């Protein structure tokens, strides 16, 4: 929905390297998936208690929001896309590895909460992407089958989660290039922003997709 991944990467890069991780930005980019505590456990297995990881997670999100707030805006064309889908009575859900603290930050900061029918955050699942739980729970909340859903993703792990859920995907090439998604058979299109996708709406409405 927003082009903020570099801000997440930079926030984690600074915090983790201050703890002695010695990660490059490229390595940090590859590690930025799943829940915050899962990320911390991958980098520092067994080092921190849950309470310590929760504290560092909040510290990271506060740093991210402070840095990104002046740049907070939707990907080009997304507001109009969400509005048109809502008017066409196409159900819409957010299935994110972010915690609600960050999802609320985006929804309220961009004024799109009114278009969203269901939200699944990191707080709502036991296993995060590429596990399909996030997307399967979103489909269940919307009352539709996984095969009726279309996922919009911008990371390989997200596309993998959609594939594991049996869902087709449109890939937004914001952070990753198309060649980084080689091998995924559930991608129907690549797009730089949502102005390129308005022709999808009649298809979505016809097939009752989300």
Image (spheres, rainbow, N blue to C red):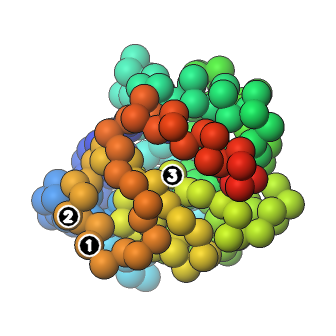
Query: Left or right: 138 with respect to 171?
Result: right
Q: Nearer the viewer, residue 9 or 82?
A: 82
Whether tag 2 and tag 1 are in contact, CB under 8 A, the answer is yes
User: What residue is shown with label 2?
Assistant: 179
Circle on res. 152 = 3
- Dot 1 and dot 3 residues touching (CB under 8 Å): no
In which quarter of the view is residue 133 placed? bottom right
Q: CA distance from mark 2 to mark 1?
A: 6 Å
Q: Is residue 101 visible?
A: no
Residue 117 relative to residue 156: left or right? right
Q: Is residue 26 above or below residue 73?
A: below
Residue placed furthest toward the right: 143
Badge 3 density bin: few <14, some 14–19, many ≥20, Cα 10 Å: many
Q: Residue at x 51, y 51 (%)?
A: 152
Q: Residue at x 31, y 47 (%)?
A: 173
User: SS class of the residue under badge 3?
Assistant: strand
The residue lying toward the viewer, choosing from 69 and 59, is: 69
Say which residue label 1 marks.
Answer: 182
Task: For marks 2 and 3, give the CA distance.
Answer: 17 Å
- How far across and how far down the image is residue 5, in percent? 35, 44
Who comes first in sequence, dot 2 or dot 3? 3
């Amino acid at each position: 929905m927003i082009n903020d991944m570099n801000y997440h990467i930079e926030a984690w890069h600074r915090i983790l390297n201050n703890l002695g991780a010695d990660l490059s930005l490229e390595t940090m980019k590859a590690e930025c998936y799943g829940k915050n505590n899962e990320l911390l456990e991958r980098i520092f297995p067994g080092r921190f208690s849950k309470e310590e990881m929760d504290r560092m997670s909040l510290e990271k999100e506060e740093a991210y929001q402070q840095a990104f707030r002046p740049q907070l805006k939707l990907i080009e064309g997304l507001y109009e896309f969400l509005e048109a889908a809502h008017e066409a009575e196409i159900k819409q859900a957010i299935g994110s590895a972010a915690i609600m603290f960050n999802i609320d930050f985006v929804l309220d900061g961009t004024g799109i909460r009114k278009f969203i029918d269901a939200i699944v955050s990191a707080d709502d699942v036991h296993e995060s992407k590429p596990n399909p739980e996030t997307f399967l729970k979103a489909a269940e909340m919307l009352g539709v089958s996984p095969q009726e859903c279309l996922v919009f993703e911008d990371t390989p792990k997200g596309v993998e989660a959609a594939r594991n859920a049996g869902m087709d995907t449109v890939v937004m090439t914001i952070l990753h290039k198309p060649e980084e998604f080689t091998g995924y058979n559930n991608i129907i299109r690549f797009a730089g922003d949502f102005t390129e996708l308005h022709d999808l709406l009649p298809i979505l409405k016809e097939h009752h997709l989300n």
